[in-house]
Amino acid sequence: MELSKYSFGIGDRFGMQGSNQLKAFINLAEQGISVTPVWNKSHREHSTVGTEPLSVMEEAKNAVHETDWKDPYHVDADHITLQTVYDYLEHADFFTIDVAAQIGVHLGREEMDHYLEFFSPFSGSMQIGGSVSCEVDDTMLRKLGNNYWKAAVEAGKIYSVISEVKGTNAFIAEISMDEVPQPQNPVDLFFILKMMELNGVRLQTIAPRFPGKFNKGIDYIGNPDEFETVFRQYLTVVKSAISHFKLPENLKLSIHTGSDKFSLYPIMNRLIKEQNMGIHVKTAGTTWLEEAIGLAESGGEASEFIADIYSQAYHRIDELTANYSTVLSIDRAELKLPEVFSALSPADMAATFRHDPQDMRYNPNIRQLMHTAYKIAGENNRQFMRLVKRHQEIIGNNVYHNIMNRHLKPLFS
């Protein structure tokens, strides 16, 4: 199974917007741009809202049937580990193997000796793809081994579990290394790709940790020029590794927490075309936010429901943000008091967390908090589902517009 050149991950926390999401891909295809949809949901998200892995596959199949989609699509078991992979084997064909917990785990003496047998031949001056150069010595190799070899070994174990059940060519493997404190540099990425190959991982996408902050639901925080430099180098490294290590020809970068990074999309668009490389961009909570925005602007019970969710989130902020601490930057002093938020008009309430930087009402702190508040919607699932169904027209338009005009077109047009 081969992932297409351009692909885009669409999360749907409550499984109700698949057709509205897919309509954006259909519209883009009508404009001559082919992007493969990948429905993704992590074990953490399933646990938070009480869903099962099968539900994502069912949503994808239903959306494909309802919209008469004829092109490929995939279902991503997102951020799986050796402990969680087994629940997803029958219900996914794309597996994001998360080895962040193994990064920085040092090797024992015998493990280091074994690792150096493979990598000592790389010692000396090295040029990667004509634009990345470095001097490789024993100290550098040992540092790379202590940082990444355990992660590659773990990835190999997980990959083996998947391939034994599904068959080597019946799934897509992605490696996730993004949820760590420090970014990998381009030389790191080159050696990581070799480590994956040595451990039998036939990966098609890899998600490194980029410089800057990729926070949930808001734009990139950092220097876009620095991102452009590193992104260009990463593309060069991937292209070089494909030829040096005989990796899959369609190997490409994956951008995690990729929604709403509006300042970066023109850079990515230009560079992937310039270097004729593919890309996978993964989004998740942006669709839940569009559901919440649609309810907020609908007035009546729907607005009151969102005001209540915000109030609970405001008072439960420590609990809700605990699992997202590395991908949130909430200035609590900038959050509106619950009684102030609930007194807003439906239009103003929606505008506070709709991602429109030109709107003076937009508050990125409220948007980030609401991103985590899907847990509260899940706790009130019956009322939430009823309200979403009642206001599906306005919500569906929001979901479509968000995916199509804020994401797919800037990235791929």
Image: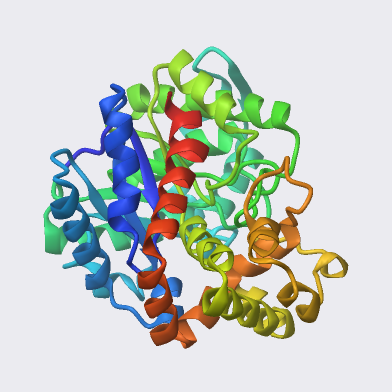
Is residue 346 in view?
A: yes
- The residue nearer to you, when weighing 50 against 163, is 50
Out of 98 and 355, give the one closest to the viewer.
Answer: 355
Residue 206 to residue 292: above or below: above
Q: On the picture, is 71 further left or further right than 16?
A: left
Residue 194 image-quadrant placement: top left
In the rendered view, would you say 337 is above or below 166?
below
Q: Nearer the viewer, residue 246 or 2?
A: 2
**Residue 5 seen:** no
Q: x%, y% of residue 227? A: 66, 32
The answer to which quarter of the image holds residue 83 is: bottom left
Name above or below for residue 367 compared with residue 35.
below
Quarter that holds the N terminus: top left
- Considering depth in this image, is 121 or 274 the residue closer to the camera? 274
Instruction: Quarter of the image for the C terminus: give it.
Output: top left
* Residue 274: % across, % down: 47, 13
x and y percent of residue 171 in the render? 20, 51
Coloring applied to the structure: rainbow
Residue at x 22%, y 55% (from the top left corner): 63
> Residue 129, how many percent across, how many down?
49, 16
Does 57 sit left or right of 278 as displayed? left
Residue placed at 40% from the left, 28% from the top?
Answer: 241
- Please, is residue 279 above or below residue 85 in the view? above
Image-based side of 335 in relation to 28, left or right? right
